[in-house]
Structures are given as C-alpha cells and as structure tokens.
Image (tube, coloured by chain):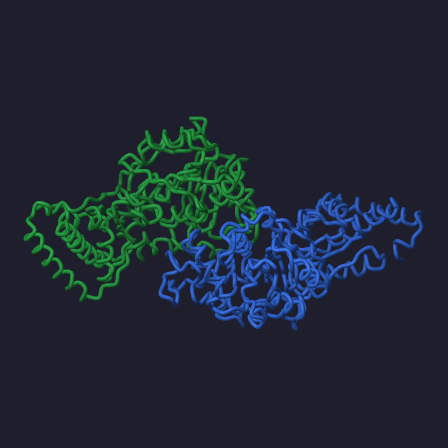
Chain colours: A blue, B green
Amino acid sequence: MNLSQMTKEEISAFKSENEKLYSDFKGKGLCLNMARGNPCKEQLQLSVDMLRVFDNGDFMSECGADVRNYGVPDGIPEAKKLFSDMIGVNTDEIIIFGNSSLSAMFFAVQCAYNKGVLGSKPWSQCGRVKFLCPVPGYDRHFKVTLFFGIEMINIPMSPTGPDIYMIYELVKNDDSIKGIWCVPQYSNPDGICYSDDTVRRFAALKPAAEDFRIFWDNAYCIHHLTDEPKYVLNILDEAKKAGNEDIVYVFGSTSKITFPGAGVAVMGGSKKNIDELRQFLGISIISYDKMNQLRHVKFFGNFDNMLAHMKKHMAIIAPKFRLVIDKLDKEIAPLGIGSWTDPKGGYFISFNAPDGCAKRIVQLCSEAGVTLTGAGATFPYGKDPYDKNIRIAPTYPPIEDLEKAMELFTICVKIAAAEKLLAE
Amino acid sequence: MNLSQMTKEEISAFKSENEKLYSDFKGKGLCLNMARGNPCKEQLQLSVDMLRVFDNGDFMSECGADVRNYGVPDGIPEAKKLFSDMIGVNTDEIIIFGNSSLSAMFFAVQCAYNKGVLGSKPWSQCGRVKFLCPVPGYDRHFKVTLFFGIEMINIPMSPTGPDIYMIYELVKNDDSIKGIWCVPQYSNPDGICYSDDTVRRFAALKPAAEDFRIFWDNAYCIHHLTDEPKYVLNILDEAKKAGNEDIVYVFGSTSKITFPGAGVAVMGGSKKNIDELRQFLGISIISYDKMNQLRHVKFFGNFDNMLAHMKKHMAIIAPKFRLVIDKLDKEIAPLGIGSWTDPKGGYFISFNAPDGCAKRIVQLCSEAGVTLTGAGATFPYGKDPYDKNIRIAPTYPPIEDLEKAMELFTICVKIAAAEKLLAE
C-alpha cells in the first residue's frame, strides 16, 4: 500500500515497526562503506598478473626509451595507441597522464585559469567565471571548479542527458560561462547514456565564449553491466563533422579497469588543444610513470582484450546491482516512497527519496554503521535543492554485506518517509 | 702554456690543429646525450628486484588499506616513515606524491598562486610577484616560476651557498618577493653544499612577505660520491629552533635512487603548511600510486638500506665524474681557458668557459654529435649574462662513450677559446 494513502495512525504504526527493526540492526555493529565507487577485492584480483609483465627484464618502449628512465612526457606510443582506441581519438590527439583522471581534469582547468585556452585571456582575469553542472553529478568535479572560485549553475538531467536546450540558451550570450562537466556514458550517479541527439548538439555547440570547453569525463566508457551495451556517440568525431573540434576535452582512465590506485589516466582532444596542453604539461613534470603505461600495454595487448577483461568485472558486480534493484523493487516500490535508476553500466544507482528525506536517511544509515555518500554531495556546493538524491555504490562490499546494508537502507527510507508524512 | 699568453700566430696554429681534430671527430658519427642528469642502465638495474615485492600477493598497507584501491591521498604510513627519515621531517610533516618532485613543487607554487599561503592573499592578486634564483641553477625550477609570470632575480652562488646577505637585503623590505629556489645539497649544477651558517641564516629568514617560502629541493640528499659525505644541516629543525618553521617547503624523491620514471616524490614542511597543502591536494587527486609507495617500502625496509643502496650507485657513477675531471685537468687546466667543479655528490659538473664561449662550445659539440644542456639553461629566462656556464651530466653514457665525448668537449673548448682570443 502506498504510504501516502495511509492514515496517520497507520503511518505511526508503520514507523514504530520499522524503528524496532532499525534498533535491532544497530545492535549488530555493522561497519560498511558504500560511499565511493570502489571496486571490490575480486575485481582488484583480475589485474594482478599485470605485475609480472617485466619478469623477462625487457623495459624498452617501441620508441627506444627505457621506461624506467626520464623522458617521453606525454606517454609512450604503444600506450597512446591502446588508450586512443579506448577514448576514441587519434594517437596524436592524446596525452597519457599518471594514475588519476581527476588530476588531468584539474590540470586542464588550471591551465585555462592561469594561462587561457588557445590564446584566450586566462580565466583568472575574466572576472566572474561560470561552469554548467548537470545534476545530480560527480562531487569531485564540482570541487575542482569550486577550488578556482568558478560559479556553478545546475543543469537538470533527463533520460537523454543534460537539458541541452537550456545549455544552448545559457551559453549563447553569456561569455562568462566557460565550461560544462559531463559524464556521458553511465553518468555519475544516474547511469544515463547521452542520446545521439544530445551528443551531436554538444558537438555543435557554439558558445559566446571561444574558450568554452566541454569536460567530457568518459570514466565509464567500457564499464558495462549488460552483454549488449549501447555506446555513446564519439563526441570528437561529431565535433569534427561540425567543424567544431576544439570544443571538447575527453578524459578516461583505467582506475576501474585495472587498479584504482595505480591505473593510467588519459586525456584526448583536437590536435590544437592537445598540443597546447602538452606544452604546459612539460612545465610541471618530466614524465609520468611510463613503467605503468607499459605494464598496461603488455597486460592487455590490444583494446579487444580490454573489452574482454571488462566482462570479468561485469560478472562480479552485475549481481550486486541486481540485488540493490531487487531490494528496492520489493521493499520501496509498493510504498511509493522513492524512485531509482536501473543502470546498464557504471558504478552507481541513483536513489531519489521523498523531498527533504535524503539527509535523514544518510544519517540513520550512518548511525547504524553503513556509510553512504553524503546527501547533497551530488550537487554543486553540496546543496541538493530538494534534499532527495542519494548515490548508492554497490560494488565494494561482499554481496552478503550488501544485502544487510540494503535491508538497513530500506528500513531507513521507510522511517524517514514516515517521519516526513507525520510532520506534514 | 696559458692560451692568453700565446701570440696571435701561436693561437691560430693551436686553433687549426684543434679544428683538424674536430673534423676527424665529426667523421666518426657520434650520437651521445649528456644533456640531462639521467642515470645509466646499470643504475636502473639496481632496483629491478623492487618489481617482485608483490609476488606473495600481499597488497595491504599497515593502515589496513589495500594499496591497489582508492584512498589514503597523502600517502601510506609506512612510506611516510621511510621518506620522512630521508628528508628529515616528522611523519605528520610529509605528503607522499607521485613519481615527480617537480610536480610537487609546481603544486605548491600553484596553490600559493591561486589560493595563497596560510590565509595570505593569492599571489595571483598581488600584482608583481618575484622569486630569488641562485645561479647557476636548475632550469626546470625557473620554468615553473616563469609559467606563473613570476619575475626572477639572480642570486650569485658562493662555495657556501647563495649570497645570503644579498638575500637578507632583498627580502627585508620588498614584500613582492615570495620565494627562493634552493638545491642545498650538491646544488644543481655546481655541486655546492650549503654551509651550516648559510642553512641557519635561511632558517631564521624573516622576509617582509609573510607568505615567502624557501623551496628547498633536496634532490640529492643522499646522492654522495665519496665514502665520508658531508650532510647539509636539517633546515626544518633549524627553522623550528628559530621559531620560524613555516618558512620552508622541503622536497625530495627517489627518481635517482630507484627509477627516474617511476620513483616516489615527497614534500615536507611544518605541520601547518602540510595540513593546508594536504587539503588542497585532495581537490586534484583521490590518491597517488600507493602500490609504488609500498613497493619502495618493501624493497628498502628502512632508511639505512637506502643509504647502502646509494653506495651501489656511487660505485657506478663516481668513476665517470673522475674521468671528466681528469680530462679537464689534463687538457684545459694548463691552458687557463676554463674552471670547473669537483663535486662530492649530485649529478653534475659545472664548467665555466671563458666569457662569451658557452653557446659556441655547445654548438660545436652538437654539430659533432654530442648534445649538452643548452648554454644559458642554468639561468632564469635561459640568459647566462656572461655566456660561460655549461652543465656537464656524466652519468648516462657508458664510460667509453663518455671518454670520447669529453675528448670532443675539450677540443671544442679549445677552439672556442682560441676564436675568442683571435677576435679580441
């Protein structure tokens, strides 16, 4: 029965019943973390053979460099080949970074802020500077723009991607809007894949600011949860067709393919963009870890093997996503006190509680030993205007723990929803 | 016989004779690079066992983190312990970075520039900002300050370190001077060790600008070329004694201990400084490569073993330094056409040609197949005011090649010096 159709008395009884279950849970001394999209042990284990690729003592890159030594600041050619296939650019349109695509994004914003973009005035000298932020989105993106004092504007998400008409309207006349954060494939946290139409409109975007850039964080480009995945259109290809190839920076990494702590991050874009950033890069580093680049190349061999490797990840984590969805379908759906996504890839399930309940749910879970991503984190400035979105990260806990955590979670949702209805 | 005491005719004959030798060299098709301080193959080989430390499948840090996963942004505790011994700070006064101390320095300048230092106004909002640059110095330091449009002021080096009296005079009233680049142990390129008096005066420095920082790049802190090394005084300890502990940022790395391309870089400083930078760091990275941190810890075990490891490096490279010095002693000293250092550690020999000859010497060498660091590179803006300093990096080439390269080098010095005397 839908909770909103119950009488106050029925809701009170429902609440008490769930509070009883909740207090039983508290006694269990749970300690589980579902805050971040961390791969689990079994996933980390999939790549340990990568650590043996140098057993034969061969450390030479095909470019003649010993990968143990200095040099080759923008990446060894064989890594450029492998990862340009992954993010869909040419080998002269890519820079290989260290282990963090967040660092690559920070680097790109930092360069624009301090040095400008292809000859434009540095953003630091532009007065007020703004970024568009599809919401809910990735908290770490928002923290980068916040660091530089860049103002953030919420853009609502739809099942086809961010509201592209709103974006067109906003950037058309306002040259203080300098960029947008996008996670096009399996968006964080909604798991939405941008439609072809959305990608084409992004690719053709002509903002008032010439130094506007789309930060296309393709973090989950091959992170599928089904056997027949839908690939998001290649934005750089589309931008080239539109004669607009400088509009986009593309990012990706192997953090959730090999090791989150020791993967390889990459950035792609038009040759013009990449040539400029490569120059700036040479100021702050002599070379990234080329041994790790070659490790990845030797381990995978080619992009097809990377795709095959991702199927092993899927086998481990798809059942965890299934468990969460099933639990929500069973416990929450009949009560009408929440909605959620059923993503076909990526790392998150996005849960929308009744308005005003997210913080309370996260607090209840936390007090019973289950840490969730902070409510509000998926919005700029940590402010969810409706206090309803919660990001669920199901990959890290063992499945038995996940089941317990989800049992607790649904109890907390029920209590918070009941509290809210009773207070109305 | 001293070249300047020869008659014009004698100098002409001397020049022709060396031009003949030079053209013989050109015919040999040499192709050697002495431009950068790169370790040689034998040195890289010293650390390959580090790649086997995970063979037992144990990836756990003592803090309970699986080093393969996300997290622990400022470094695992066992790495903090090992490397705080190396750079002489406490374990809560250190951040473990990725493979590049240059990146750590860039990061520190970037934070000061965009966010300020412990609450000061960001340098970007301070109008004209200046840095002091002991010369000759490290070209990559100068490029970082240049990137941010920071004006650079040359400070002459003496055998006890940079001219500390000049520094005191300059910083006393000018609050636009925000920092200084220092390589205190075996300075790049002069190989000078700062005296105790110099270190103590640095530690007690009270500049007009409260946000002034000494960038203490202790790149060669344990990179000795003798069995009885002299250690430079611990500046953070001295600064604490002077009640001035926020004055200095200390940097170091294992680039020339394990692998230049895959070492571990660190930064130390007062708790206050490090706490602030740790916060900023969390914006741009989730964690550096903790697998590589643990690799280093497992390989070395403790700091004493690192010191023992450095003796193996010494055994490989000390003879190369000897060869260069011997060659210069034999070929150049009697002619009075140059002076050079005889460093007790570090990676370079600093050669001073007669004024106005450095560019010509580098050009002559280059045309005969030996690449040296560009003349001028050891000065801010690439401008050696006397065009005389050349940095010689003897570590990389095999000793037979080094011998040939030095033969060519001395011939080029002779030709350039003769040309100059004849033109006077």
The residue furthest front is A173
From the viewer's side, name the closer residue of A118 and A154.
A118
Left or right position of A162 against B300: right
Left or right position of B286 against A56: right
Residue at position x 82%, y 55% in the image: A337
Classify A238 as above or below A288: below
From the viewer's side, name the closer residue of B43 and B329.
B329
Residue at position x 24%, y 55% in the image: B362
* Residue B60 percent across, percent down from the top left: 53, 50
Residue at position x 52%, y 63% in the image: A268
Left or right position of B68 against A371: left
* Residue B244 percent across, percent down from the top left: 45, 29
From the viewer's side, name the closer residue of B199 and B265.
B199
Q: How many marks?
A: 0
**Residue B165 in view:** yes
Residue at position x 50%, y 71% in the image: A302
The residue furthest top is B242
**Residue B316 in view:** no
* Residue A370 percent across, percent down from the top left: 70, 48
From the viewer's side, name the closer residue of A202 and B214.
A202
* Residue A214 percent across, percent down from the top left: 59, 60
